[in-house]
Structures are given as C-alpha cells and as structure tokens.
Image (tube, grey):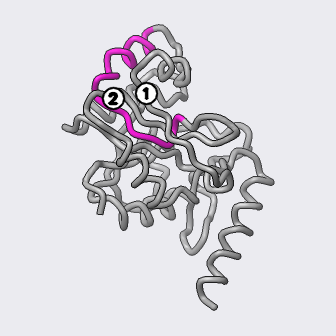
C-alpha cells in the first residue's frame, strides 16, 4: 500500500452535472464517493475526503471540512488538508476520476522528490491539477489564494517548482462533469468489470 495519505476532493458544486456527482451511483457502490473511497482505501494506508459538509455521506470515513465561508474551490480543501494532516505531502484526486489507477499513482510517486512543490499528471489534452502530489511548501501560496479569491491551480503550479509527468492513456483521466460523461463512464466500468469476470 502507498504510505502517502490520499485526499479525495468531493467539495465541488457539480453545476454542470445538475446534481451532486459524489452521490450518483457507480459500480457496485451506492455512490461515486463510496466507490472512490473503497477502492482508494485498498491502495493507500490513509484516505480522507475533502468536502464542505460530511452530512450528505451515508458511510463512515475520515472527512476534512473546508474552512467556513469560502467559495466552492479546491484551494480551501488544500489549506484544510494540510492543517488536518501532519504530513509534508499528500496525493490528491478528484471525486469524478474513477479510472485513475495504481500505475498512475506509482509513477507520480516515482517522479517526486523533496525539492518539488508538486508533481502533476499530464496528458495530450493538458495538465490534470487534481491528480497529483502537493507538498506543504505550497500552503502559504494556497492561503494567499484564498484571501485573494484566486483559485487558479494551473497558475500556481506554473509559478512553483512543479514536475509534470506525462501519461498516454487519456481515457484514464476522464472527468464526469456532464450527464453524458457519467453515462459513458458507467458503460466503460461495466465493460471492464465484465471482461475481468469472464
């Protein structure tokens, strides 16, 4: 199991989905959140869920709540995660990327080193700031971003000591932002599951 703590970000507004994507059913789990938490818990020694409220979840897990009175943005989650966890670095993944697998996490860990601020996955379509490793060295920058209500992770990463790790398989990084993307992901998961069962 990976010793680095994994923080699952589930505090978004889900405006493009039209409903809270974290609560949509996925795979054999009643919700996408539980599906992600269960599978990540088999890979990491510690998994926590970053969210604005834990009341909506019907399963037990370590929850890290966003600071009060902040926008729906991962910036708040990063500040709370480092406040809550006594760690120098964390692996992060967004709730809506159910196909990120152990090979990706391992490649990110292999590319990391103490002098880095972050190690971020990238594909031909661009970088994926919510699939990567963040170091505590970025906390002052996150706090400044919160004060200024500037939540552009890409801007922060480009101004920091970030290493980008390229991956070829774009489908593993599919985000479930819209209803059709969610339906496509369900179909893909079912096909993968059936092929494994055969």
The image shows residue 57 at horizontal and vertical percentages of: 46, 55
Q: CA distance from mark 2 to mark 1?
A: 6 Å
Q: Height in image: 40 above or below 70? A: below
- The numbered mark, 2 or 1, whose residue comes first in the sequence reads 2
Q: Height in image: 113 above or below 101? A: above
**Part of the protein shown in magenta:** 129-147
Q: Height in image: 112 above or below 103? A: above
The image shows residue 61 at horizontal and vertical percentages of: 34, 56
The image shows residue 48 at horizontal and vertical percentages of: 35, 49
59 on left or right of 33: left
Q: Height in image: 165 above or below 97? A: above
Q: Looking at this view, is 195 or 181 the one in front? A: 195
Please identify the quadrant where the N terminus is shown.
bottom left
The image shows residue 157 at horizontal and vertical percentages of: 48, 23
Which residue is pictured at 53% across the width and 14% down the height?
Answer: 150
Which residue is pictured at 65% across the width and 40% down the height?
Answer: 14
Please check the rendered image and state whether residue 138 is part of the magenta-colored stretch, yes or no. Answer: yes
Which residue is pictured at 50% across the width and 41% down the height?
Answer: 165
> Which residue corresponds to mark 2?
116
Q: Dot 2: what SS?
A: loop
Please identify the quadrant where the C terminus is shown.
bottom right
Q: Residues within 10 Å of mark 1 (few under 14, many from 20)?
A: some
Q: Looking at this view, is 63 or 83 the one in front? A: 83
Which residue is pictured at 51% across the width and 64% down the height?
Answer: 35
168 on left or right of 135: right
Is the C-beta separation of discs 2 and 1 under 8 Å? yes
Q: Looking at this view, is 188 or 52 the one in front? A: 188
Mark count: 2
Give the numbered dot on residue 162.
Answer: 1
32 on left or right of 92: right
58 on left or right of 169: left
Please check the rendered image and state whether residue 89 is part of the magenta-colored stretch, yes or no. Answer: no
């Amino acid at each position: 199991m990976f010793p680095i703590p994994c923080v699952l970000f589930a505090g978004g507004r889900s405006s493009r989905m039209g409903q809270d994507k974290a609560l949509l059913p996925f795979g054999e789990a009643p919700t996408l959140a539980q599906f992600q938490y269960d599978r990540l818990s088999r890979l990491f020694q510690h998994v926590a869920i970053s969210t604005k409220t834990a009341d909506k979840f019907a399963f037990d897990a370590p929850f890290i709540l966003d600071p009060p009175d902040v926008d729906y943005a991962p910036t708040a989650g990063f500040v709370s995660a480092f406040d809550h966890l006594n760690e120098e670095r964390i692996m992060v993944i967004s709730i809506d990327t159910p196909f990120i697998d152990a090979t990706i996490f391992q490649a990110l860990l292999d590319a990391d080193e103490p002098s880095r601020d972050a190690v971020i996955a990238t594909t031909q379509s661009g970088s994926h700031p919510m699939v990567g490793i963040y170091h505590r060295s970025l906390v002052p920058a996150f706090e400044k971003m919160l004060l200024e209500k500037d939540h552009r992770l890409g801007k922060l990463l480009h101004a920091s000591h970030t290493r980008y790790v390229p991956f070829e398989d774009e489908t593993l990084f599919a985000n479930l932002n819209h209803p059709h993307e969610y339906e496509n992901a369900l179909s893909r998961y079912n096909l993968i599951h059936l092929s494994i069962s055969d």
